[in-house]
Amino acid sequence: MTKYYNITGLTVAMDSFGRTVTQAAPYECEPVDRPDIVVGGDWKRIKAMAEQLSDEDCEYLATGNSFYSQLLCHDGMMLHSSAVVMDGQAYLFSAPSGTGKSTHTALWRKVFGEDRALILNDDKPALRFENGRFYAYGTPWSGKTDQNLNLRVPLAGVCMLYRGEVNRIEPFSGPAAIHAILEQTVRPADPTKIGILLDLLDKLLTTVPIWKMHCNMDPEAARVSYAAMSAGRKERYL
């Protein structure tokens, strides 16, 4: 049965099952005649390539891929990252799987308190460019965990994480930054959508502070990243 959801401020129609429906429940809304996005996806194709995954997990991946691909046509994109919200601002930490992005945002919750630091989405938050600035959104697709919130939060900064013995953070820009972000998002095969994605990346790098951080797993890492990124946000938006 088709259900309707408000995800990233858009009305999404989706006929799904299992984990996808469970995690999308907080986003459910009233039906409309013309949804902004109709989510599809062939979970059986994914199953054929990854037999070790359950049918539910294959459906979860298929619907997520369908949603994020169509989001590009609504000035939006996915960034493989863990998004933490603090004092009404979203900070995204992106890195290849296994680098420690979820561990880093967990440190924010440990250091600053779970009531103050909230996980918006622990794997695939969405970004949308609206009225001249970017906002981060929670979505039902949050990787291996169910850590996601149906919230829209101003994006204060994006940080690419790398492992290091000493905590060090610095501004990140230019071709290296573009390449690093491209590695952590959906790159469509459709040339038209590639153009949309590159335009969004250009806006992201010119309107949002981008950082590169080498960090360890000590609580100090959270303090170092927050100090730099919160100060950078204030300077950018003064």
Image (cartoon, grey):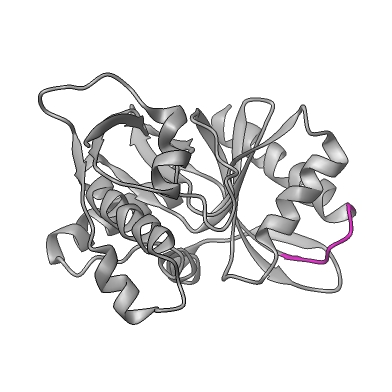
Residue 53 is at least partly visible in this image:
yes
Q: Is residue 238 above or below residue 14?
A: above
Q: Does 120 sit above or below residue 78?
A: above
Q: Is residue 205 left or right of residue 108?
A: left
User: Magenta part mainly helix, strand or loop?
Assistant: loop
Which stretch is magenta? 214-219
Left or right of 85, for residue 155: left
Q: Where is residue 40 drawn, in percent x and y?
A: 21, 52
Query: Which one is in front, 206 or 145?
Result: 145
Query: Does the magenta portion include 68?
Result: no
Residue 139 falls left or right of residue 165: left
Residue 61 pos. (x, y %): 38, 60
Q: Residue at x 49, y 71 (%)?
A: 176
Quadrant containing the N terminus is top left
The C terminus sits in image quarter: top right
Q: Quadrant of residue 170?
A: bottom right
